[in-house]
Image (cartoon, grey):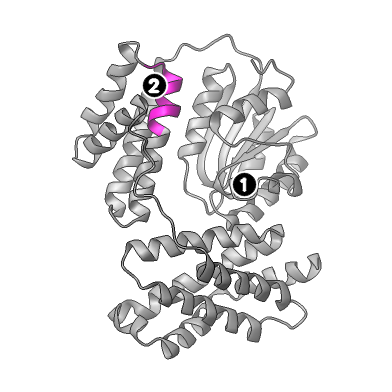
Amino acid sequence: MEQQNRLAATVLETGAAGLGSAATLKLLENQPEASAAFGNEAWSLWKTHFGDQALELAAALRAGNPEMFQTRVRWHRSAFAARQVPENWLRSALEAFREVIADELPPNAAGTAVKWLDAAVRDFDNVPADTPESLLDMDKPEHRLAARYVAAVLDGDPRGAMKLVLDAVSSGALDTRAACIEVLVPAQQEIGLQWHLGQLGIAEEHLGTATTQRLLTLLAAATERPTDNGRKAIVAGVAGDPHDMGVRLLADFLDVAGWTSICLGGDVPSGEIARAAARYDADLLALSATLGRHVDRVRDTIVASRALAGGKLKILVGGRAFAEAPDLWRSIGADGYGRSATEAVTVAAELCGLDAG
């Protein structure tokens, strides 16, 4: 079965564009209103959707984890609902995609993919869509500050937004770690949710991310650093994954924990990460993946880095892709997994023989 799943994943990855075109044609024939609503952009939008879905299904098949795919289908469902797209269109899209996969994949490879698509359709029928309007809990003072921060950013006042948090730190109401974990992380998650729900555009989302990154840098610089622990870490997001907020946050947390922390940012090719790990004689390599389709890049980076950097290198992974499949990190050759930046620092210390306290 594992070999069949790998074959199916390869066909999905290499044929994503063609499969996307075939599924789009089938959907628009069966559901012409799904074309009329989007006008001239309908073909491009649906083809992109199906191409992404092919890559998401391929990633889940390689991991042997159907929940990875199911989670992405639910994500698309809530995004469609927020944009007033009728639910039956997405259900019809799943059915069209399922028919194309059954027809186009080799018979000895299609079984699991079709089974998982059938399960996604059943989930559609049996599980109501449930997307929160906000992730912030206004009973928590930190979340109230996060809400004020988000409001100031979206009002076009990033300096005022940063001042809200910096004032809370300077007054002693928050320490820098709490400001990051209890205020900025929830704030950034809230901005991401509002973008997902169609309440914000790309410009506003980018403004929020850029402001938070600036503030993280200021908070890290203002944090007293303990004695150097003698360990060096490389932190990076893999190729194809530009999301680097978590990467930067972890790099800052490692730095204030006494590590020499080298942040490469997001979307870094596997070979470049491996060369950096070897060049800087790293003790730890921390890799992030946001989507399931990025997990193979993590695996490739692990193999390349171990080959170049030698046996002492410990490898830690994190990011949403691993949160959706908590045991996935074991199957790709990593040494550990951190569900958050705080947990990742603790796991990193344990992997490298440091006092985690």
Magenta segment main secondary structure: helix
Q: Quadrant of the image for the N terminus?
A: bottom right
Q: Position of residue 85 (x, y in %)?
A: 34, 71
- Relative side of 6 to 206, left or right: right
Residue 70 located within the stretch drawn in magenta: no
In the rendered view, tell whether residue 255 sits above or below residue 331.
above
User: Can you name the residue that lies furthest to the bottom here?
Assistant: 29
Mark 2 lies on residue: 219
- Relative side of 348 to 136, left or right: right
**Mark nearer the viewer, 2 or 1:** 1
**Number of callouts in the render?**
2
Residue 310: tell me if it is visible.
Answer: yes
Residue drawn 28% across the image and 50% down it: 203
Q: Position of residue 267 (x, y in %)?
A: 52, 48
Q: Position of residue 54 (x, y in %)?
A: 57, 70
Residue drawn 72% across the image and 82% down it: 106
Residue drawn 30% across the image and 28% down it: 145
- Relative side of 33 to 121, left or right: left
In the rendered view, tell whether residue 303 sits above or below residue 251.
below
Residue 281: tell me if it is visible.
Answer: no
User: Can you name the residue that lies furthest to the top here?
Assistant: 227
Magenta residues, start to end: 174-184
Separation (CA) of disc 2 from disc 1: 27 Å
In the rendered view, tell whether residue 269 sits above or below residue 115.
above
Residue drawn 51% across the image and 71% down it: 125
Label 2, secondary structure: give it.
helix
Q: Amino acid at mark 1?
A: Phe
Residue closest to the eye, 130 or 197: 130
Mark 1 lies on residue: 322
Quadrant housing residue 82: bottom left
